[in-house]
Image (tube, rainbow, N blue to C red):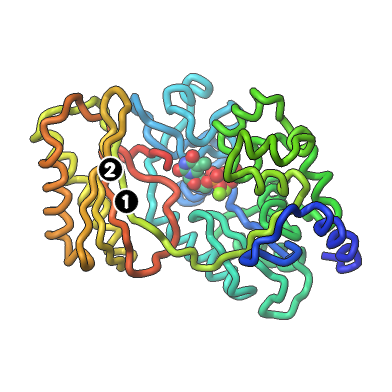
Amino acid sequence: MRPACRGATVRFMESHAPEEDDSEEADGLRKIIHVDMDAFFASVEQRDDPSLQGKPVAVGGSRARGVVAAASYEARTFGVRSAMPSVKALRLCPHLIFVPPRFEAYKTVSRQIRAIFADYTPLIEPLSLDEAYLDVTQDLKGIGSATHIAQLIRARIKAETGLTASAGVSYNKFIAKLASDQNKPDGLCVIRPGEGAQFVAGLPVRRFHGVGPRGAEKMAALGIETGADLRARDLPFLRQHFGAQADYLYRAARGIDLRRVRPNRPRKSIGGERTFERDISTGSALREALARIIDLVWHDIERLDAKGRTVTLKLRLSDFTLRTHARSLARAVAGREEFARLAEELLDSVLPLPQPVRLMGLTLSALEKKGEVAPVATVEGGGQLDLF
Ligand code: TTP
Ligand code: MG
Ligand code: MG
């Protein structure tokens, strides 16, 4: 990034940042790279099974309540997208090939790319298995240019994993993440200080990190479609409609983001859940389902070598009401047996239920140890995928 742009942008920041949080950057100017793998799960499947290459592939379950986790770029030309019900995806692309997920393979790649990042900076904040923010304001190799580092990282990812990644390079996390999406797949986009506000103005707000599909809908109802529309609203208006998110949005619309890259974000919980093919109501069927979820979650607890004190059972009933029941110990849960017993006791304590159960989830929280990274998806009934 060109230091010549720095002064101008600092003045810009000072005149517009409404209040400064001590825990954030003083001026929000860093050298940030956001790296994100292209069509991640689907690309791994295509790499490992050459018969899938060049074909429309969806990772996920094809059954009634299945959801597409990842769509290959070939599938995307038909309109197939992540989080789309599989039934709809098949309607759009009748010859779509469904592949069940192989999380171990994705985790292996995730470890490989993080090892590459670690050669350039210790300041790595993974957002999911396939993406991370890197602060390279001071890189370990003394390269100096964030753009050059991003190119080196993309080339090494290609050489060492056989997969492509896209990168965004900018002066803060918000813009870097938007930029990594800009020239996908296998793309690089650099937004320099001073260019951020204009870049953001032209983008649809649904692409902003933190504005989910529901947030975008809410904004659309208020006449806010683009960054420019958002920028036209004042802070009191944003506070009225978006509460705690208002300050972040106000700054984002101006290309400002004061958040630091936070390495080793501590994991708060480990959990998993299942949506059943058909709602279930009998105690025995629920206990059986719980046993499978205990297996699933305990597997992750062991993998992450985590210890925690609180077990939470979550049930979504057929009318979509949500019930959560938790039990906390004074010390960490001792092992698999105790974890299973606490979960079973929680279930027994709520039986009989007024309605059949649509979804069941189990979580261990109040963790002692720092884990790796929040998983991007959980396994549903029959190996399908659900979103957090
Ligand atoms: P993304 O990086 O959001 O998507 P992607 O890598 O498939 O495609 P892109 O080229 O646009 O980055 O997510 C990474 C992986 O996370 C994705 O391959 C599958 C998983 N995932 C889900 O399981 N559910 C979801 O809703 C999304 C968005 C992703
Ligand atoms: Mg990706
Ligand atoms: Mg991603």
* Rendered image: mark on residue 271: 1
Quarter that holds the C terminus: top left
- Rendering quarter of residue 233: top right
Name the kind of residue labelled 1 in the image.
Answer: Gly
Q: Hey, which quadrant is residue 298 in on the image?
A: bottom left
Residue 266 visible somewhere in the drawing? yes
Secondary structure at numbered mark 1: strand
> Is residue 185 at least partly visible in the picture?
no
Q: Earlier in the sequence, mark 2 or mark 1?
A: 1
Front in this rendered view, residue 224 or 63: 224
* Residue 340 appears left or right of 154: left
| Separation of marks 2 and 1 at Cα, in angstroms | 7 Å
- Residue picked out by circle 2: 361
Secondary structure of the residue carrying numbered label 2:
strand
Rendered location of residue 275, percent (x, y): 30, 34
Which residue type does callout 2 highlight? Gly
At horizontal 90% and vertical 60% (from top left) the residue drawn is: 8
Whether 27 is drawn above or below 345: the answer is below
